[in-house]
Image (cartoon, rainbow, N blue to C red):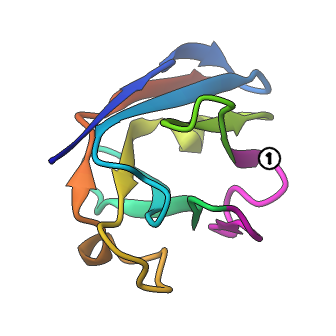
């Protein structure tokens, strides 16, 4: 079993930055892909960023490209989402997710097997 715990959310003014962390425990993650998703009130959960756990070119939603960066920590069980130039429309509950096996699809929620509980990000104008 895999457990994912997000942290780092909070309230920030537009233009500010936050770094979200996702700590994973359980099975080895060397073969998994990781992703970040977000869900705003009344909206569907949407893809933000994803990458193979072993590295490679990351994938981003167009809305965050150039502002957000997904990375893996030196501790092999941690993944980060660095969020810069935040906008009010980035306000959402942010989720970390892991794929049980490599699917090649980072964008769809149904390709992820494990989810964290979410961390709230609120950007004020």
Left or right of 116? Residue 58 is right
Left or right of 1? Residue 124 is right
Q: Is residue 106 above or below residue 83?
A: below
Quarter residue 81 falls in = top right
Q: Which residues are drawn in magenta? A: 55-70
In the rendered image, the residue lying farthest to the bottom is 104
Residue 96 image position (x, y, % from top left): 39, 45
Quarter residue 76 falls in = top right
Whether residue 77 appears in magenta in the rendering, the answer is no
Q: Is residue 119 above or below residue 52?
A: above
Image quarter (top left, top right, bottom left or bottom right) of the C terminus: top right
Report the predominant secondary structure element of the magenta stretch.
Answer: loop
What residue sits 54% from the left and 58% below the top? Answer: 48
In the rendered image, the residue lying farthest to the right is 66
- Would residue 125 be seen by someone viewing this image from the given angle? no
Residue 24 image position (x, y, % from top left): 37, 36
**Residue identifier under label 1:** 67
- Would residue 86 be seen by someone viewing this image from the given angle? yes
Mark 1: which secondary structure?
loop
């Amino acid at each position: 079993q895999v457990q994912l715990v997000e942290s780092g959310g909070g309230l920030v003014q537009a233009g500010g930055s936050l770094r979200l962390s996702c700590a994973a425990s359980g099975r080895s993650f060397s073969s998994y892909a990781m992703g970040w998703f977000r869900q705003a009130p009344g909206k569907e959960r949407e893809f933000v960023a994803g990458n193979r756990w072993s590295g490679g070119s990351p994938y981003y939603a167009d809305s965050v490209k150039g502002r957000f960066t997904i990375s893996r920590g030196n501790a092999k069980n941690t993944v980060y989402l660095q969020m810069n130039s935040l906008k009010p429309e980035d306000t959402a509950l942010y989720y970390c997710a892991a794929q049980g096996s490599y699917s090649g699809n980072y964008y769809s929620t149904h390709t992820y097997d494990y989810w964290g509980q979410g961390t709230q990000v609120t950007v004020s104008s």
